[in-house]
Amino acid sequence: MNCTEQKYFSTIDFVLFALLLVASMAIGLYYAFSGGQQRTTREFLMADKSMKCLPLSLSLMATFQSAVAIVGTPAEVFTSGTQYWFIGCSYILGLLIPAHIFIPVFYRLHLTSAYQYLELRFCKAVRICGTLTFIFQMVIYMGVGIYTPALALNAVTGFHLWGAVLATGLVCTIYTALGGLKAVIWTDVFQTVVMFAGQLAVIIVGVHQAGGLSHVWRKVTEGNRISGFDLNPDPTVRHTFWTLAFGGVFLMLSLYGVNQTQVQRYLSSRTEKEAVMSCYMVFPCLQIALGLSCVMGLVMFACYSDNSPLDNRYITSKDQMVLYFVMDMLQGFPGLPGLFVACLFSASLSTISSAFNSLATVTMEDLIKPHYPSMTETRAAQLAKILAFAYGILCLAMAYAVHLMKSSVLQAALSIFGMVGGPLLGVFCLGIFFPLANSTGAVTGLVAGLVMSFWIGIGGFVTQIPSIITVRPDNCTDMAATGNATMATVTTAMAPITDEASKPVGLHALYSLSYMWYSAFGSSAVILIGLVVSLVTGPMKEGELSAGTVYPLMDKAQDFMQKLVKSKPCRGSSAEQRQIGTCQEQGNGPVGTERNTRNEEERETFLPLSQVSYLEQETSV
């Protein structure tokens, strides 16, 4: 394929793409005119608390398995190898902690918005600050999510850029505004199936075109694309094992622990047990999705290792790599390019529909309802639908703003979540794990954390140096000079300089911090500053805490250690046995009685807030 040649969709490709949009719209219309017809906020925003764990788990995965990941991850593996795969290690703690700490706390408080927790634990000002921060985060990310697939499709196939943006945005807005959370979850399930099918089709055909699995393996090993454990502790290195496996834990916690889009799904489940199970089931789903994306990147490298489209300037950004590969390798298979584009737009739809619904929820529950407590359920549901539609229109405006961005989409998206999601995670952790934290400390910590995160994030963006594409000597015309304005707007990925000859020092070293550490840095800053301010201004007293808002972490850890000690066989001297208690008398005597008393007191303090009169006034869902 020469550099000026463009591949185009066949009729069947357009049909498959249109079927995706029609099917998604049909699901939304079905839930708009069936059941309770979304007449109450409980049904529209919380799916009537009737969801089972399987659709919830698929929806939880689809929400952040966006087009950014499907486009960005294979491109990352193609250019840098499989080091990024180690982010899968962060999924373990990143899902276990929400399952056993955040979900029990939120579910037992019978919340609708995650930020109601901040008012129960601190005060109304903290709740408003958290809500506004979340809105800011998701509005920016919506622009990235909807613009990414449209740009890649336009750049490689000539499909109209803003036509794709409008089609995606309007369809998503309509079915979200009409069908509510049930429509969002079930379209996520359908779109997840399409995502997996599209990726599998591309991988199978790509392996065949590359000459088989053995040829793919030989090419990627010769090209050093199979990465080992990079145990470099330097936090300025973009991707290492520590950066991905441990820095990624904080990113996962900010997404799956306290982000409203995910918390809302947990709270829509029928029981707390099903909410926890859905969190467990996300783990294999995320691993499969990550594995497919990494394999696709390796297959792309095997096909193009000797003739890279980036080197030949057939494309100007690695973010266009995936669709170029699809259109180049799958052109002889009618329908498969359309299937993959449907896969790409499915990921985009699932992400932005979740954003619309969660944004409507927090705006309604945190900013409007408190000022109009007498509003009827019918009126509230109608207003929530209007809000979802309004955020859809705002999403289209943000897509134009993202049009001006100059960074790889994967890094840009994760940077946004790190810079904003990290401080939000910090303020929730401050409330859940530290009983002495007060409202002044929470507000000060959140504001300071956001300022520091954006200082480092923006400083890093400004001081980055764009990586240079090596151009092979040939007769190809530079695509930027051909008048293709869309292609010219996309630039290569930006990465900090980390080679030994120019080791960053001073502020530049801080700005060179890997974007995967942004969330950890932001949350840690909030916790440390919040605790210091709380101690200075007067820590919160135990009697001032609302029941169920603090997780008894130390008591749980102490009981766990005691169970480990008691489960060991009785060996050693009689003196040792007397010190820890004999096996035959576990739990008896003064020590056991004291522990049992403490456990009873713990259960009294960690109760559902349904027993608190304040909650009954607040949660009228």
Image: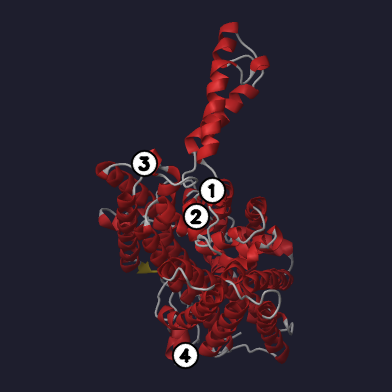
- Amino acid residing under circle 3: Leu
Q: Nearer the viewer, mark 2 or mark 4?
A: 2
Crowd class of label 4 (few under 14; some 14 to 19; many from 20; radius 10 Å): few
Q: Amino acid at mark 2?
A: Leu
Who is closer to the viewer here, 55 or 332? 55
Can the viewer see residue 540 in this picture? yes
The residue closer to the viewer here, 380 or 512, is: 380
Residue 279 picture location, percent across and down:
62, 54
- Earlier in the chain: of badge 3 and badge 1, it is 3
Q: Is residue 59 left or right of residue 579?
A: right
Amino acid carrying mark 4 in the image: Asn
Instruction: Give, as a three-letter code, the residue at label 1.
Output: Gln
N-term-proximal mark, 4 vs 1: 4
Residue with the mark numbered 1: 611
Query: Alpha-carbon distance for marks 2 and 4?
Result: 58 Å
Q: Which residue is mark 2?
A: 615
- Circle 3: element type: loop
- Between circles 4 and 3, the one closer to the viewer is 3
Horizontally, is 498 left or right of 38 in the view? Answer: left
- Number of the label disc, if any, that sits on residue 484: 4
Q: Which mark is residue 463?
A: none
- The answer to which image quadrant residue 545 occupies is top left
